């Protein structure tokens, strides 16, 4: 038994020295990144959360309102722009069955609608900062690049597909609302592999600590 332990220790020391002398990296990044994603998404249904708007649970049923002066080039934090975006998202998610939609009146020539979550919508809802709909699990297919150019940081790029993808996110009108969600079409439709990058802090011993990953992201 002691002999076996000595052999294991010698082998481990040899691999460590080989890594230090040659710059080789024996990290199994595919397993590491898969574990990272599953850690931050233990249910397998909340890899990505898409913001509908700042409508909290106690605000339903919610009735739309209109603010004059909307222009498509308004700053994204402008209240008029934000309200217009909310109205548009409510209507689109209602078409996918996540909200009920009821005409309750008019503001001049503009219709006013009342929205409430359906049972289907409640399967995906998350209340962080308002109403969000979440879906999916990242499944890593292959590592495409390991970049050590930044001191103390390692960037690992990979390709992936997604499991547990509902039909509503496959609607182009829905995923096009989130231009900052890179590769959302690939992730949502599965027509091609999506791309992701995990960022790790690296200490003096070569140990990695995840700084930013793919799962658990909220997109406005």
Image (tube, rainbow, N blue to C red):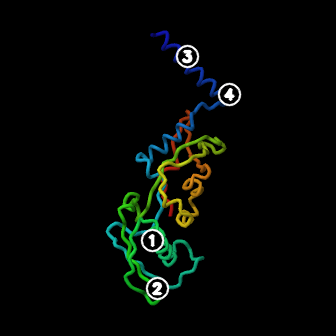
Spatial CA distance of label 2 from label 4 is: 69 Å
Q: Which residue is mark 3?
A: 10
Q: Which residue is mark 4?
A: 22
Spatial CA distance of label 3 from label 4 is: 18 Å
Q: Secondary structure at mark 2?
A: strand
Q: Quadrant of residue 104?
A: bottom left
Q: Which residue is mark 1?
A: 90
Q: Secondary structure at mark 4?
A: helix
Q: Would you place residue 32 above or below residue 63 in this image?
A: above
Spatial CA distance of label 3 from label 1 is: 63 Å
Q: Residues within 10 Å of mark 4 (few under 14, many from 20)?
A: few
Q: Would you place residue 123 above or below residue 108 in this image?
A: above
Q: Quadrant of residue 176?
A: bottom right
Say left or right for 216 vs 176: left
Q: Please state which of the two labelled residues, at mark 3 or mark 1, is closer to the viewer.
A: 1
| Residue 204 disc label | none
Q: Which residue is mark 2?
A: 110
Q: Secondary structure at mark 3?
A: helix
Please report whichever mark, 4 or 1, sits nearer to the chain's N-terminal start. 4
Q: Please state which of the two labelled residues, at mark 2 or mark 3, is closer to the viewer.
A: 2
Q: Residue at x 65, y 30 (%)?
A: 24
Q: Are marks 3 and 1 in contact (CB under 8 Å)?
A: no
Q: Residue furthest bottom?
A: 108
Please report whichever mark, 3 or 1, sits nearer to the chain's N-terminal start. 3
Please report whichever mark, 2 or 4, sits nearer to the chain's N-terminal start. 4
Q: Residue at x 59, y 25 (%)?
A: 16
The answer to whether residue 193 is visible is yes
Spatial CA distance of label 4 from label 1 is: 56 Å
């Amino acid at each position: 038994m002691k002999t076996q332990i000595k052999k294991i220790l010698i082998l481990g020391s040899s691999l460590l020295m080989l890594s230090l002398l040659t710059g080789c990296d024996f990290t199994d990044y595919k397993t590491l990144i898969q574990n990272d994603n599953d850690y931050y998404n233990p249910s397998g249904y909340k890899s990505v959360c898409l913001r509908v708007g700042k409508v909290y649970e106690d605000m339903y049923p919610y009735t739309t309102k209109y603010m004059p002066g909307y222009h498509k080039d308004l700053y994204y934090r402008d209240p008029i722009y934000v309200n217009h975006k909310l109205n548009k998202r409510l209507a689109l998610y209602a078409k996918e069955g996540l909200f009920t939609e009821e005409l309750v009146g008019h503001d001049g020539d503009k219709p006013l609608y009342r929205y409430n979550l359906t049972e289907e919508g409640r399967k995906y809802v998350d209340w962080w900062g308002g109403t969000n709909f979440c879906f999916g699990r990242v499944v890593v297919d292959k590592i495409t690049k390991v970049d050590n150019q930044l001191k103390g940081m390692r960037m690992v790029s990979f390709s992936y597909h997604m499991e547990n993808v509902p039909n509503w996110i496959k609607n182009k009108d829905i995923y096009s609302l989130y231009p900052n969600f890179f590769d959302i079409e690939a992730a949502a439709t599965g027509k091609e592999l999506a791309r992701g990058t995990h960022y790790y802090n690296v200490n003096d011993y070569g140990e990695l600590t995840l700084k930013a990953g793919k799962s658990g992201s909220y997109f406005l």
